[in-house]
Image (cartoon, rainbow, N blue to C red):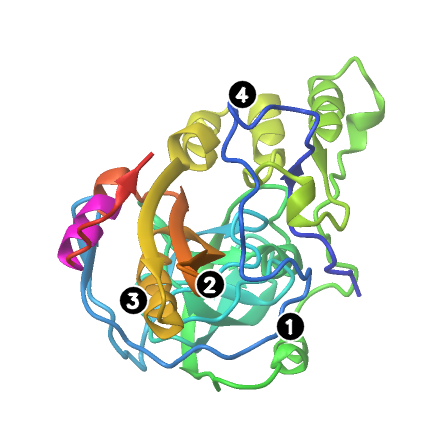
């Protein structure tokens, strides 16, 4: 069965500068490529608004929906999810805007018939037409890492336990080929430098790495380049929409949320802002005492700076700093 050691497509440090593409490497809860599974807390959550649309979290045992699934990887690896778990690109997890956290859903790729039960432990996506965001590992098993997205059906299964590693259970739920693609591009004409696919494949392979990179070895992950390769080769209009959704410049953001001496308060605030993006947690000393400095640095696709500022106002944060 295919391995899951990578964090998804990650930009090699020498390819671009942080100033040009994305944000610089920043503190995370952990740099472990396989963070502890489970933890966090059970929550339904309060209604929240992203880009003018209000989402109302609720328990709906009959939930099912069809739409587009995308995936996310190294950008959020090692950071807290909206219910306080640690996101791992190598775990079988996903994000949904309204289902209880954590929950199990069965996701079926309607393009190829593959199916998998996924642990929902985060919020998102916020792009029109997308019904779920999956981890790099889940997307690889469902066979759409290279395409960037897939047409899927999502069906609620039930509540997931808070503690313990459910990887074996989720792996056992998988229906599909045993040699699923973990992300390395496979294009028949790639050997020929004369073809458009071959040239774009070689170009992107020079910029991206699927090795077991640590967060310090990358400036920012910007999703997968292979959707761009496919769109370029086919001449489809999907490229512009795809590029906009993963554009590192538009999603790079730095909002100082404050420094907290109470770790419980810091974690609770990090979970609230994890709905919108990646929250850095930096351990500092204030008057000789340990404290946690929180910074929102990277927005999820569809979330905006105005959404982040509105949430800060809603929570009564008076000492936020927009860098």
Q: Can you give x and y, in whole percent of width and height, for residue 66 in the image? A: 38, 59
Q: CA distance from mark 1 to mark 3?
A: 24 Å
Q: Is residue 311 magenta?
A: yes
Q: Residue placed farthest to the front in the image?
A: 287
Residue range in magenta is: 308-315
- Secondary element under disc 4, as helix, strand or loop, is loop
* Residue at numbered disc 4: 235
Q: Is residue 125 left or right of residue 46?
A: right
Quarter of the rendering occupied by the C terminus: top left
- Within the image, what quadrant is residue 289 found in? bottom left
Q: Which comes sooner in the sequence, label 4 or label 2?
A: 2
Q: Which comes sooner in the sequence, label 4 or label 1?
A: 1
- Secondary element under disc 2, as helix, strand or loop, is loop
Camera-nearest label, 2 or 1: 2
Q: Residues within 10 Å of mark 3 (few under 14, many from 20)?
A: many
* Residue at numbered disc 1: 174
* Residue at numbered disc 3: 98
Q: Which comes sooner in the sequence, label 1 or label 3?
A: 3
- Secondary element under disc 3, as helix, strand or loop, is loop
* Residue at numbered disc 2: 80
Residue at image x 58%, y 22%?
232
Residue at image x 51%, y 24%?
19
Give the label on residue 83, or none.
none
Camera-nearest label, 4 or 3: 3
Q: Which comes sooner in the sequence, label 2 or label 3?
A: 2
Secondary structure mostly taken by the magenta-highlighted segment of the chain: helix
- Secondary element under disc 1, as helix, strand or loop, is loop
Q: Is residue 30 magenta?
A: no
């Amino acid at each position: 069965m295919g391995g899951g050691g990578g964090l998804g497509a990650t930009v090699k440090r020498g390819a671009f500068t942080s100033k040009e593409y994305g944000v610089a490497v920043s503190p995370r809860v952990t740099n472990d490529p396989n963070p502890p599974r489970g933890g966090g807390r059970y929550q339904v959550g309060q209604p929240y608004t992203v880009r003018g649309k209000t989402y109302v979290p609720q328990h709906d045992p009959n939930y099912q929906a069809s739409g587009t699934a995308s995936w996310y990887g190294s950008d959020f690896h090692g950071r807290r999810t909206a219910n306080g778990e640690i996101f791992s690109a190598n775990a079988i997890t996903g994000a949904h805007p309204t289902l209880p956290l954590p929950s199990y859903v069965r996701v079926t790729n309607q393009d190829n018939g593959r199916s998998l039960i996924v642990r929902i432990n985060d919020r998102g996506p916020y792009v029109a037409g997308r019904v779920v965001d999956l981890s790099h590992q889940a997307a690889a098993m469902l066979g759409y890492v290279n395409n960037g997205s897939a047409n899927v059906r999502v069906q609620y299964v039930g509540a997931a336990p808070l503690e313990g590693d459910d990887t074996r259970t989720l792996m056992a739920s998988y229906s599909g080929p045993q040699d699923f693609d973990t992300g390395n591009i496979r294009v028949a004409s790639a050997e020929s430098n004369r073809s458009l696919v071959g040239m774009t494949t070689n170009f992107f392979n020079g910029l991206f790495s699927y090795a077991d990179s640590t967060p310090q070895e990358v400036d920012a992950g910007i999703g997968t380049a292979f959707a761009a390769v496919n769109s370029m080769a086919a001449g489809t209009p999907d490229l512009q929409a795809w590029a906009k959704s993963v554009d590192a410049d538009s999603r790079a953001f730095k909002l100082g949320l404050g420094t907290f001496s109470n770790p419980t308060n810091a974690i609770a605030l990090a979970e609230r802002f994890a709905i919108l993006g990646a929250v850095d947690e930096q351990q500092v000393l204030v008057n000789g005492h340990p404290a946690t400095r929180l910074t929102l640095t990277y927005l999820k696709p569809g979330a905006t700076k105005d959404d982040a500022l509105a949430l800060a106002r809603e929570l009564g944060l008076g000492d936020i700093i927009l860098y």
